[in-house]
Amino acid sequence: MADYRKMWEDLGMDVDQHDVLCEVLPQAFGDVYLSQENRPEKMDYFNMVVAEIHGIRPAELIEFQKNGGKVVGTFCIHVPDEVVFGCGAINTGLCSGSQFWVPGGEKYLPTATCPLIKASLGARFEKTCPFFRLADLFVGETTCDGKKKAWEIMSKDAPMYIFDLPQMKRDKDVEFFKDEVYRYIARIEELTGNKLTPESLHDAIVLINKKRRAMQRLWEFRKLDNVPISGKDCLLISQIAFYDDPTRFAQKVNELCDELDKRKEQNVSVYKKGATRLMLTGTPLSIPNWKLHHIIESSGAAVVCEEMCTGSRYFELTVDESGKTMDEMVDHLTDRYMKGINCACYTPNTERVDDIIRLAKEYNVDGVIDVNLKFCNIYDTEGHIVEKELKDHNIPVLGIETDYTDEDSEQLKTRIEAFVEMI
Ligand code: BJ8
């Protein structure tokens, strides 16, 4: 790995503490990923991105900033990347999936807060993540109560902007979201000093759609009887999608798909014949949270789909590219980013249940695991509706709650193996 110490110091990071993270990550990645057999060769690029996760991309972003560019960090898939790219800035995801940052977050938040939020605050306040140091603007959103309050705390230390979201999807809520998109455009224009034009927004829509289409293409392989790529690898790619350069990312995913086309012709599978096919649904699995996939796939079952924000919710829908005027394009962004995202923060959220049933059929799954990050009240509560509906459709379902620690790994393994056995 190249030496990025100077860069991290210049970012004001706590480099000694950060070294602790740098020591454990390669080991964890090796155990979970590099131990897999028969991986596609084109996963090499994604391996390299993870190996240098706090190096290559931050260095690119800093170079961009030196030339006057701005970097915007977001925490939720409701916030449209297209606005940022259309203004000539770069968007990067800031979700945190490591237990490493949780104790730092607990200094500011109640213990009974979901690990995703605690890790986000920990990463910022403990100065141990370059992305949380370099962003010019942090964009929070009003999805769940924990996040809303966490942004108030983070705003004492970081330049924050709040994207307000409605709680329902009525016509007046759609209008509200549209207004928020316009307000966001004004803020990003102010940040960058660049005007968003119909042309630049159209180009950004096309750019981000290409990334989503590449992911759609990749996910199609997971519908096959002989699945040529593991769920773990697809999860990794979904996680990397949040912060990699969109053009390069789409190209690398398409190159991987070309390799998978050949595997498809030869009926190559990474799983044993007859492996149980599982879908995960629930709260997001931010990088480097690979725990569940690892437990499931080490037990011989296959994860073939994730109805999650690190999964289908991120790429299934593209933005309509036919808009000519700014207003038409903002309408299309609203269709995609509000009406099209079925997060438990909405009431009602019946479309999510419809999605789960549809995906279970499309990916021909044998069972569903409903995953909840500990202390996420909205997904936990919605789990009741999800699990009842799945049972009504005769789809076996297992509800689990977990966090970023490894403390429950053995227990989860036992429960998941029993579930697979029972299917
Ligand atoms: S669109 S899922 S990315 S809000 S897990 S922080 S909800 S307490 S992450 Fe999310 Fe946007 Fe919805 Fe997706 Fe709160 Fe729950 Fe924690 Fe969560």
Image (cartoon, rainbow, N blue to C red):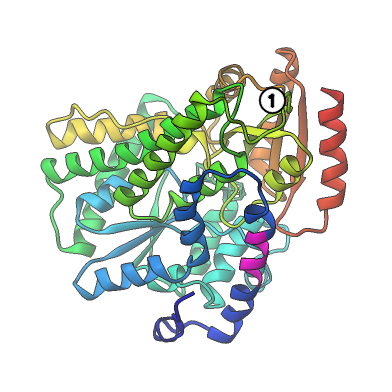
The residue labelled by disc 1 is 385
Q: Does residue 13 appear anywhere in the picture?
A: yes
Determine the image quadrant of residue 250.
top left
Instruction: Identify the magenta region.
Output: 24-30
Q: Considering depth in this image, is 398 or 215 the residue closer to the camera?
A: 215
Q: Residue 149 at x, y = what percent?
A: 55, 59
What's the residue at 51%, 61% (across, down)? 50
Circle 1 — which element?
Answer: helix
What's the residue at 51%, 26% (across, down)? 264
Q: Amino acid at mark 1?
A: Ile
Would residue 347 be found to the left or right of residue 332 on screen?
A: right
Would residue 196 be found to the left or right of residue 217 on screen?
A: left
What's the residue at 45%, 77% (across, down)? 2
Q: Considering depth in this image, is 81 or 137 the residue closer to the camera?
A: 81
- Asked if the beta carbon under badge 1 is closer than 8 A to the nearest atom of ligand 1, the reply is no
Q: Residue 85 at x, y = what percent?
A: 25, 52
Query: Measured along the vertical axis of the image, is residue 27 above or below residue 329?
Result: below
Quadrant that contains the C terminus: top right
Q: Residue 14 at x, y = what percent?
A: 53, 84
Q: Residues within 10 Å of mark 1 (few under 14, many from 20)?
A: few
Would residue 330 be found to the left or right of residue 404 on screen?
A: left
